[in-house]
Amino acid sequence: MRIATSQYQSMMNQSLQKNQERITYVTQQMANGNRIQLPSDDPVDSVRMSRLKREEAAVKQYRDNIAAVQQRMSKTEGYLQNMVNDMQSGRDLLVWASDGSNTPDDLKSMVTSLTSLRDSILYTANTIDQEGRHVFSGTVTGSAPIAYDATQPLGARYSYAGNTNAQTVVVGNGITQTANQNVKGLEKLLNQLDQTIDTLSNSGRDASDATVKATLSANLDGFDDAMDLLSGKVAVLGGQQNILSTIDANHQNVSLSNQMAINDIGQLDVGAAAIELNGYSTALQATYKAYSKIGTLSLFSAL
């Protein structure tokens, strides 16, 4: 059987090209460590890896959300606890003020401490985060939660200007977490403190005065109510953070499983690839040698 020179050259070129392509392909595999370079290399495993990577991206977003919410909750819990601590010291002061042995001057000397306490609670309630949003306004983060109107009568100058709507964040598949808080109800304590400060500021009032007793008693009840309100929120925040930690740990386990599966499916067997690369290199060299050797032959050389 005779083979034309052009046919022979075409066959040799195809062989050289095929071996060179395989060498390039295996070299790329070894360079990046991935067995699958194109979806067509292994359609079934490519789909599996694609699904795993989508799930891994979702899990990463959930964990990022959890970290952000936990950081926000931790700060919110700290603000609330600070207000509770201030209220406890204010309550102790009012218990002392209720002692019948106090003179009018003793009562008047407490005004400065109560004023500082009221202003401290108001400042903390109207706290602004690093992004310029009010922490305790519900979803109305552009407005201060506790508003003050000096034109209103004593005992009604403080009002809650936020709302109680929840800002929810997705922390899992079908799982959301409320990320914000409000201080609705705290305005009542501030108004009571306003009245107490005004009452104790008047000269000639002592602890046996009926008005003083009624004002102090109402303010003590107001402190108890406000402390119960904020302490309850602190407890809820602590429980929510524990739940988020558990969810995050579950996400971490899922993420580890996904990464192991992606690695098992897509990782290249370097040893097998090296053997394959060596085989293609040897075949390429042999083809070059054969091409060079046959190219020097002719019909006349056989005579």
Image: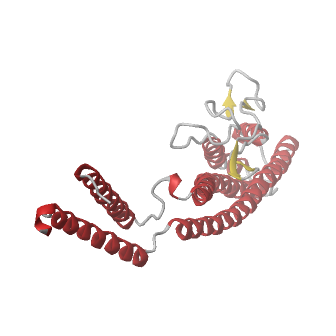
When the figure is inspected, residue 52 is found, relative to residue 145, above or below; the finding is: below
Q: Residue at x 19, y 64 (%)?
A: 294
When the figure is inspected, residue 281 is found, relative to residue 121, above or below; the finding is: below
Q: Residue at x 28, y 56 (%)?
A: 3
Q: Position of residue 281 (x, y in %)?
A: 28, 70
278 left or right of 89 in image: left
Front-lying residue, 129 or 49: 49
Task: Please tell me in which quadrant of the rendered image residue 136 appears.
Answer: top right
Query: Which image quarter is the N terminus in?
Result: bottom left
42 left or right of 84 in image: left
When the figure is inspected, residue 159 is found, relative to residue 108, above or below; the finding is: above
The answer to whether one can see residue 38 in this image is yes
Front-lying residue, 21 or 239: 21
Q: Position of residue 172 (x, y in %)?
A: 70, 54
Q: Residue at x 51, y 43 (%)?
A: 130
Q: By what rule are the colours in the image chosen?
A: secondary structure
Q: Residue furthest front?
A: 303
289 left or right of 107 in image: left
Say how many tags the image has: 0
The answer to whether one can see residue 298 in this image is no
Q: Position of residue 108 (x, y in %)?
A: 68, 45
